[in-house]
Amino acid sequence: MRAKKLVLITIFLSLFSLSAGAYAETISVAVAANVQYAFDELRAAFKQETGNDAVGTINSSGKFVAQISNGAPFDVFVSADMEFPEKLYKDGMTTAAPKVYAYGALVVWTTKNIDLTQWQAALTANQTTHIGVANPKAAPYGRETIKVFNALKLEQNLQPKLVFGESIAQTNQYIYSGAVDLGFTAKSVVLSPEMQGKGKWVDVPKTLYQPIAQGAVVLTYGRDHHAKTAQQFYDFLYSAKARAIFERYGYLLP
């Protein structure tokens, strides 16, 4: 009799598991390159909490806008600023206006023997021949880096040294590999488990730029194909659990 009960319980649990799995969904998320490392934790926490999965594609926010405008099948857009998702909202490609989930911070990072306590002097030093910057037309962190150069009145002098990556991710590759002497990236990158302790970095004073308001939106594709799960992931980005993850990666919270 006991064995029969155990068999019935096993069958019930198996059926429950299959039923739960049948309703689990996978959504596609356009993830700004600065969020790349934090997204791994966000995805894991979301899946643990809901059973649903969120698969991220990493690129610059500007590239995503072009892709989404041309019909790319993304459910949610996690941007590196507010301007790019705002454009999609005005074009009728999101379910609502973007909302800030975090504020990003800039750092100077190098893997070379450069004294970053004097990073402004290092920028103009003769020994510094290549400086990594994300493309300011497509990557908001690149845009803010140019504002830093303007605030220091150095943009014209530094122009011959600048090496532009298509996104923060490519800029990180330039810095980490030593292809550039130093570069500007997101604080979330140097605090990530993958990059912690690799090279040296310092914060860029917030008097030289505006901490970057980063917004997210549910896209109309997500509404039409995975409405419940897309909204669920969007809401998760503003939850206490997600906010704690963002804070660990050096983001400021709204």
Image (cartoon, rainbow, N blue to C red):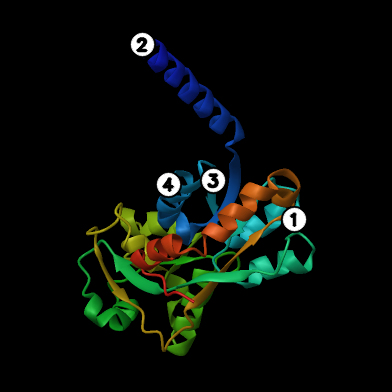
The percent coordinates of residue 254 (x first, y second) are 49, 77
**Nearer the viewer's eye, disc 1 or disc 2?**
2
**Which residue is at 46% across, 16% downward?**
8
**Nearer the viewer's eye, disc 3 or disc 2?**
2
Residue matched to label 4 = 44
Residue matched to label 2 = 3
Marker disc for residue 42: none
Q: Secondary structure at mark 4?
A: helix
Residue matched to label 1 = 69
Q: What amino acid does circle 1 point to?
A: Ser
**Which residue is at 45% across, 74% downward?**
253
Residue matched to label 3 = 54
The percent coordinates of residue 102 (x first, y second) are 49, 70
Q: Earlier in the sequence, mark 4 or mark 1?
A: 4
Residue toward you, 242 or 70: 242
Label 2: few (<14), some (14–19) or many (≥20) C-alpha neighbours in 10 Å: few
Question: How many numbered discs, if any?
Answer: 4
Q: Residue furthest front?
A: 1
In space, the residues marked 3 and 2 are separated at their CA atoms by 40 Å
The percent coordinates of residue 169 (x first, y second) are 45, 56
* 19 on left or right of 128: right
